[in-house]
Image (cartoon, rainbow, N blue to C red):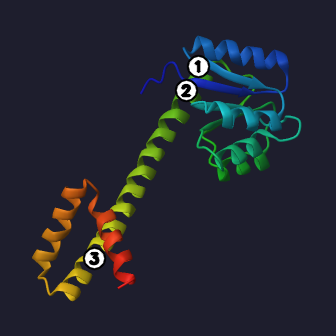
Amino acid sequence: MKNTGLQIYIAEDDPLVRMGFEAQVRLCGHKIAGTSGNGADAIQEIIRLKPDVMILDIDMPEYDGITVAEKVNKVISVPAVIVTGYRSEEYADRASRAGIYAYLQKPIDEYELRLAINIAHTQHMKQESIRKEKMQAEQKLKDRVLIERAKGFLMDQFGLSDDQAMKALQKRSENSNTRMAEVARDILDKGKHL
C-alpha cells in the first residue's frame, strides 16, 4: 500500500540531521507536520498537530524518542519510527515493548525511510481498524444485554410475551427516532423508580 501525502512529525536534536530528514520526507512525497529538537516540546506539538507518523531520534534533551512515543500514545494514537546513531539492545528492547513500528540506525537513506513510514502507517491503520471493530462488537454486546433486560422488564411488568416486548421496544425506538439500546436504558432507568 502506498501512503503518499502523509503528515510527518520529526523530532531530532541535531539541526543538520533534522534538515536531512525533512528533505528525505519530502522526497518520499510526504509533508512536514512539524519539527523539534527537544523531547518535551515534541510531545506537546505532536499531540496538538496529530500527525500521521512521527520520526523520533532516541537521543534528545529532556525525553528520548521512545519516551516521547509512549507519552504521546497515552493521549493520541500516532505510529512511531525510531532513529538512532548507535546500536543498543536496551533501546531496541524498549522500542519493541513500546510498540514502535520501525527502528532505524543512522545514516538512513530515502528508501529505508520511505519503507519505514509506509509500514508504520499501514500497520497502524490496520491495528486501529481492528481496535474499532472490537469496540463496536463490545458495544453491540452491551446494547444486546440492555435490550434483553428491558424486554424482561416489560414482560414482567405488563405480562407481554418475548415477541410483544421486542415489538414494543422497536415501536418506541422508531417513534422517538432513538437507538433501541437507548430506549432500553430509558425503560430500565424509569423502572427503578416504580
Residue indicated by mark 3: 150
Circles 1 and 2: CB atoms closer than 8 Å: yes
Where does the image place residue 124, in percent across and percent down from the top left? 51, 40
The amino acid at mark 2 is Leu
Quarter that holds the N terminus: top left
- Residue 124 appears left or right of 49: left
Spatial CA distance of label 3 from label 2 is 52 Å
Spatial CA distance of label 1 from label 2 is 6 Å
Viewer-nearest of discs 3 and 2:
3
- Residue 104 visible in image: no
Where does the image place residue 48, in percent across and percent down from the top left? 67, 34
Is 155 above or below relative to 174? below
Where does the image place residue 115, in percent across and percent down from the top left? 55, 26
Q: Quadrant of residue 145?
A: bottom left
Is 172 above or below relative to 87? below
Q: Quadrant of residue 158?
A: bottom left
Q: Residue at x 42, y 57 (%)?
A: 135
Could you tell which of marks 1 and 3 lies nearer the N-terminus?
1
Q: Quadrant of residue 72?
A: top right
Could you tell which of marks 3 and 2 lies nearer the N-terminus?
2
- Residue 35 visible in image: yes
Q: Residue at x 77, y 20 (%)?
A: 18
Quarter that holds the C terminus: bottom left
- Residue 1 appears left or right of 50: left
Badge 2 crowding class, 10 Å Cα cut-off, few under 14, some 14 to 19, many 20 or more, is some
Residue indicated by mark 2: 115
* Disc number for residue 111: 1
* Secondary structure at numbered mark 1: helix
